[in-house]
Amino acid sequence: MKARQRGSQKERKFPSMAIECLVLGAGQQVGKSCVVVSMNGKRIMFDCGMDMAYHDHRRHPDFSRISESGDFDKALTCIVITHFHLDHIGALPYFTEVCGYRGPIYMTYPTKALAPSMLEDYRKVMVERRGEEEQFTSEHIVECMKKVIAVDVKQTVQVDKDLMIRAYYAGHVLGAAMFYTKVGDSAIVYTGDYNMTPDRHLGAAQIDRLQLDLLITESTYATTIRDSKYSREAEFLKAVHKCVLGGGKVLIPTFALGRAQELCILLEDYWERMNLKIPIYFSSGLTMQANMYYKMLISWTSQKVKETYSTRNAFDFKHVLNFDRSMISAPGPCVLFATPGWISGGFSLEVFKQWAPSEMNLITLPGYCAAGTIGHKLMSGKRTKIDLDKDTQLDVRCQIHQLSFSPHTDAKGIMDLVKFLSPKHVILVHGEKPKMATLKGRIYSELGIRCDDPANNETVCIPSTHHVEVKDERAAEGILVEEKSKRAKIVHQDELLLMLGEKKHDIRFAYCFPINTDNLEDTKSTDVSSSSNALSMSGRCSWLPMLYIKLSDELSGGNIQYFGEQIQVESFSVSLCLKDRCPYRIVDSPPNKCEAVFFCCTWSIADEKLAWKIISILENLDYGTC
């Protein structure tokens, strides 16, 4: 490919290899996040999550689409994990220790600290309590985490000489990060889950204004605009207070990290103000352990939590106690945080079975619940009966409250981020298909940015731009070369031949034709001494200087040169043909037996138009007076 402008030591823009985005999870679904991006010879896996609603092979992404041979070290450059939720990290130990990936894994310091506890708790619930087939062992989790390289916010990490990544604060949960990734001049941002508004314990997502080819963003709340945080908090507290004052029990199914801490801070403050003595419980030691990490990683929390840390740690909950299984049937009101969220199994499902049949009790669902889970079924409308499995049905008479305490950004937040970054292209993941389609239309119609919402196992290809620095003046008009796994560059054609180990092949065209000498007689009287060249007029060689004069008149301003035996114009060369039988001769002599002189012409393909123009000028001198 040739550069459009001449000049040396300039930076040019050229179309490069397309960025390919293979969606292995979170394609038109919430959960099982896993996106593989190929850019300029590098292949990065973003997140490696599981689908909590399935217990068969559909639980994990289809890793065979990355490499049919199973050589994942060769197929991937690295893995990047955005946060510790299982729908973003749950399949990682399986992929590394069972499938055999041995390459680098990047995540933030809090994610590395908290992920082992999340994974081990899940393993215990699925295997030890529910008797399911073990996907990975405790040893697998330990070995997996040994491969992790921890990064800090805004720390630029050079994965190799071409690939760079940088983490940005995402809110959502402790340690969650958006990741900026750059290979050569192609750049993308993968958001993972994020929140554009601060809450009581975490700050809002923050990112620099970047030049991006692609933004891959979550779209959990693609069409939802949330009301004010204060009205949501007031509604939640009113519902909980009313239930416990009536002697009922409140079940808040939530994951151990994130909403649990947010709602505990809220309840702790309310219990203090109202002087309530009703117990608040955590269902397991995991959440207590999580609170310890929150205390240690205070720098990742909200500004308010950091400012008050010297006088009071927001995660020292005076009213929150540990809950034992034997207390499920104990009389009296209480508030219980039980894991996991979505009532997808574990202790939250066990408690739900006991408490749901009573009208006095309350189930509060503080955020999104994935399709297929009990939580999602409860949110889908007024339910009096719930199918727990194919053989078990449960009467549901308790109160159901759905409150928007999700740590995900809403539709306004997504649009604000897309507008701020203004990428060339947007891909939506981690959302529901109809809502994603609506948001996709808004991004294109309001912001003029192309947007896709691929399903699982689909690949989206988008063009990227390459900036190539031209340092060699000979390559100002050169050839754009992109070697495998190397940065593109412009080379001179001679250098390209050396790279390919080939010799230069210069194709030239030839044509031999007659000119009637009678037509040239008129030029013999012409005084050619005025020419800058001392032209010899003796013998047959006199015809070349006369042709030189004719061409000089016809091609004014052309670079015409006379070298005694030939005339040169760019690559076009004409000389007197002295061969009796020339292989390039079309006719032996002009018609009417006129006396003729033959001339041989050669030229390169670049000057084809010029060559036929000159030949036409010379041939028009022919046959005129015969």
Image (spheres, helix red, strand yellow):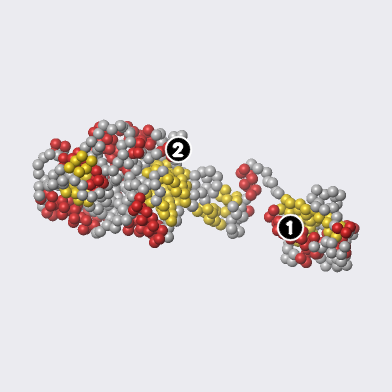
Identify which residue is drawn at 52% across, 47% down: 487
The residue at 41%/38% (across/down) is 63
Quadrant location of the C terminus? bottom right
At x 38%, y 36%, the residue is: 96
Type of amino acid under label 2? Ser
Q: Where is residue 383 in the image (x, y as percent from the top left)?
A: 20, 47
- Identify the disc placed on residue 67: 2
Residue 533 is drawn in which quadrant?
A: bottom right
User: Could you tell me residue 70's position as x and y percent?
Assistant: 44, 34
Q: Can residue 167 be seen in this view?
A: no
In front of the other: 278 or 372: 372
Q: Residue at x 11, y 54 (%)?
A: 274
Which of the two discs, 2 and 1, labels the residue nearer the N terminus?
A: 2
Q: Residue 171 got which mark?
A: none
610 left or right of 469? right
Q: Where is residue 373 in the image (x, y as percent from the top left)?
A: 27, 43
Count of residue discs:
2
Label 1 CA crowd tier, 10 Å (few <14, some 14–19, many 20+) = many
In the image: residue 526, left or right of residue 64: right
Residue nearest the viewer, comparing 140 with 514: 514
Query: Between marks 2 and 1, how big is the CA–CA gap?
Result: 54 Å
Q: What element carries label 1?
A: helix
Question: Could you tell me residue 225's position as x and y percent?
Answer: 29, 58
Q: Residues within 10 Å of mark 2 (few under 14, many from 20)?
A: few
> Is 47 located above or below residue 199 in the figure?
above
Residue 584 seen by the camera: yes
Name the residue beneath numbered marker 1: 611
Q: Element at badge 2?
A: loop
Vertical arrangement, residue 41 with respect to residue 605, above or below: above
Q: Do the residues labelled 2 and 1 touch (CB within 8 Å)?
A: no
Identify the amino acid type marked 1.
Ala
